[in-house]
Amino acid sequence: MLGMLQAYKKARKIYLKTGRRTKFLTFFSLLYSCHLRETVSIGDGTKLGYNGLGCVIHDNCIIGRHCIIAQNVTLGGRKFHEGVPRLEDYVEVGAGAVILGGVTVGEHSIIGANAVVLKDVPPYSVAAGVPAKIIRTLRDEKSENGGVLGLIYSDLTDKCMIRFMPYALCMEGV
Ligand SMILES: CC(C)(COP(=O)(O)OP(=O)(O)OC[C@H]1O[C@@H](n2cnc3c(N)ncnc32)[C@H](O)[C@@H]1OP(=O)(O)O)[C@@H](O)C(=O)NCCC(=O)NCCS
């Protein structure tokens, strides 16, 4: 059985080739209770926790490479505001977070569980709360190696194992 992202990836290929939306993706959307259409752009290495259970991703969203999106996340439009959310590379979005309107979440940022993000989040930030505020910055200016929070992350896998250990084993990627 395909996971949600695997189904998306197949549908995306067809969409890019023919411009057509596929019906089988609807089946997987129902199966995983996840709205993710082939019109969304998702970079390589991005993962959905629990097969995207409960996620609603706006059809025009752009999601970068190596992001992690937990369950129950909404990336959607906002009334009277133009645009839809864009996640840059290496963004992690906690469970239940809601990101609305044409906001950009900068690379290597983390959105806390249940946050409601209504403004741009600069790179290397942790944003949490309702409405979300920056509670911490991740770039360790003093570190010679540019490490994050003083830890040296050689790649995302290390990083997500540290931050998202509880569900790192339940993720599937593109
Ligand atoms: C936002 C998050 C990344 C912060 O982690 P952290 O940098 O280790 O921060 P801390 O736990 O030290 O908390 C720092 C402060 O932010 C608050 N905070 C932490 N997470 C918060 C959240 N999601 N919403 C609101 N406030 C939050 C803490 O209460 C604390 O406040 P205080 O300084 O007044 O006591 C983390 O709490 C989080 O939400 N991770 C998402 C995990 C997730 O969704 N996993 C999916 C499991 S299936």
Image (tube, grey):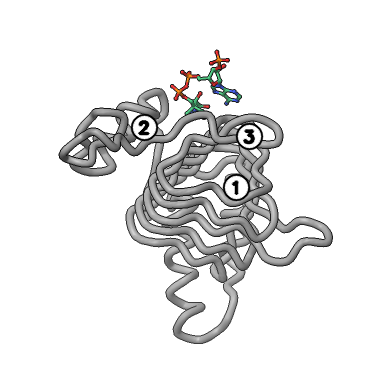
- Left or right of 156, for residue 8: right
Q: Which mark is residue 31?
A: 1
Label 1 sits on a secondary structure element that is helix
Residue at 57% across, 81% down: 20
> Image point 52% across, 63% down: which residue?
62
Query: CB of residue at label 1: within 8 Å of ligand 1?
Result: no
Query: In percent of the image, x 43 and y 67: which residue is there?
Result: 10
Identify residue type, mark 1: Leu
Label 3 neighbour load within 10 Å: few <14, some 14-19, many 20+? many
Q: Is residue 71 left or right of residue 167?
A: right
Farthest front residue in view: 142
Image mark for residue 115? 3
Q: Find disc 2 in the rendering and name its residue.
A: 168
User: Is the Cβ of the residue at disc 2 closer than 8 Å to that at disc 1?
Assistant: no
Question: Residue 77's x, y, as percent?
Answer: 72, 58
Q: Position of residue 8 (x, y in %)?
A: 49, 61
Which residue is at the far bottom?
18
Q: In the picture provided, is 79 more to the left or to the right than 92?
A: right
* Earlier residue among tags 3 and 2: 3
Q: Is residue 13 above or below residue 33?
A: below
Circle count = 3
- What's the amino acid at mark 3? Ala
Q: Is mark 3 within 8 Å of ligand 1?
A: yes
Element assignment for label 3? loop
Q: Earlier in the sequence, mark 2 or mark 1?
A: 1
What's the CA distance linking mark 1 and mark 3?
A: 26 Å
For marks 1 and 3 on the same chain, the one whose residue lies earlier in the sequence: 1
Distance from Cα at disc 3 to Cα at disc 2? 20 Å
> Three-letter amino acid code at disc 2?
Ala
In the image, residue 41 above or below residue 123: below
